[in-house]
Amino acid sequence: MVLQTVLERAKTFLPDWPDWALDVLLIMTGCLFITMVLTHFYTPEDEKSSTTTSTTTKQNGDTRANLHKEFDAFRHKYIAVYLVIMLADWMQGTHMYTLYLSYNVNVSALFLTGFLSGALFAPFLGSFVDKFGRKNSCIVYCVLEIIINTLEHSQDFGVLLFGRVLGGISTNLLFSAFESWMATEHRKRGFPEDWMSRTYSEASIGNGAMAILAGIVSQMLEDRLGHIGPFQGAIALTVLALLMVLPWEENYGENKEDKDHSLYHQFSEGWGTTLSNSHIWRIGMTQALSEGAMYTFVFMWVPTMLSMDPPGGLPTGCVFSAMMMAITIGGMIYPPVQSFFSTYLVSKEKAPELCASFVYLAAAVSMAVPAFCLSHKAFEATFVSVIVSFMVVECCVGLFMPVAGTLRSKYVPDALQGAILNIFRLPLNAVVVSGTYATDVLEASLVFKLVSGCFLAAALLQSTFLFESKPAAEVATSTKKKD
């Protein structure tokens, strides 16, 4: 009764949206606030020790407390750029469909071109990132995004098509160049490996926050400047990101023991290492299955909820904001969740592998709920169950973003980060294209079964790391030494 009274009073300050949507938004806001409060009091074990010890590191002789200060400054510098580029990316993504619709062009052809471009350039682009330099590649990404968003002002289909080709290239750079730079720079500065998971966690939290902010800012820009408004805002943000990247130090994907530093050598080494090392290709396939399932869900949630004829209609912006809060919650609880696994269930070295398996399994169960509900129309709590399952899977997304990044940094060699991260995008694009096609030709219940199956397959494949006799730390070290 108290909760109901609080919800009713809060609704008086909100837009005139359906009650069920406002309930979802307010409940997720409350969950986010509670999570923020609880995680605020969580202190990682290494930070606890830094307040009571002054042992020096082998790298630079600084105390551990001073090393923490250096790490915080480095992490904040990277996260600041990451948040700006993700805000710009979200602002485009949330309004691209409506922009193309207003131009009266073939929207499906444009989106498909982007996916195909990404798949076509992925095998080669990563080697370019490692050879040309990660900072330089980040700069190229920013320049490409400025060009792409400028091209969006044209209503000519050919110009828009060219923009989508460039978009496929820039997407690959977005998800490889920045992370490769961060992981290599983290190690160059002598920070402990397990601290990297904190950077990934904060990136996941920030990604959800930027998605929420993008919905508000882009809507304001669209109201003021028309459909092109969010893209003009994205240009300004990308220019800001470019200026923030310029002071970064450069790092490359070159092994000092290799005499051949040609682009072809980098390309062949990336493919050879991926195919010959089972840990690397298993990580790649696991993340292709999980992220492919996630993108398929993105295509499904709106038509699924519309098909259920929710009372008062479907305010997509309201539900989208609630989902992004769920992602933010997932990113916040990742450090204590992994700490729980490493303290009570497995060794610290295998905690990320167990955490990933658990998260993928939880996502599989959550996606089985709409598959069951849509197959059994008489199920009384169908609508509520589906909404809850959607929030749970988004929370899982917030969790597997940092854990996936932690596993990539653990098993993928520094010298081949760019090449291998782009190779991972090949099976990912294949799953996304297949999932997109499935949403057009199959019933919703069957699509959700496939999504659940992909998450379950990811969980099973990830769990194979837990049953290896060789210690995880030793496996990771040998993986990196191979390159």
Image (cartoon, rainbow, N blue to C red):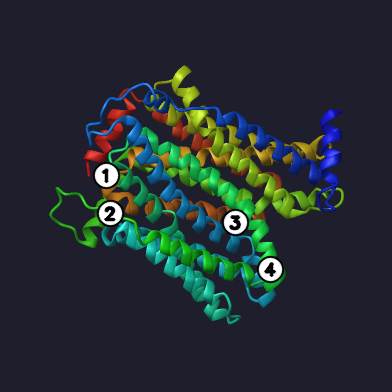
Q: Quadrant of residue 361?
A: top right
Looking at the rendered image, the disc whose residue lies closer to the viewer, 4 or 3, is 4
* Residue 222: numbered disc: 4
Residue 352 percent across, percent down from the top left: 43, 31
Q: Is the Cβ of the residue at disc 1 closer than 8 Å to that at disc 4?
A: no
Kind of residue sitting beneath label 2: Asn
Mark 4 or mark 2: whose residue is earlier in sequence = 4
Q: CA distance from mark 3 to mark 2?
A: 37 Å
Mark 3 or mark 2: whose residue is earlier in sequence = 2
The residue drawn where x is 67% and y is 51% is: 300
Mark 1 or mark 4: whose residue is earlier in sequence = 1
Residue located beneath label 2 in the image: 251
Residue 265 percent across, percent down from the top left: 21, 57
Helix, strand or loop at mark 3: helix
Kind of residue sitting beneath label 4: Glu
Relative to 333, say whether 272 is above or below: below
Q: Quadrant of residue 317?
A: bottom right
Give the crowd class for mark 3: few <14, some 14-19, many >=20 residues within 10 Å: many
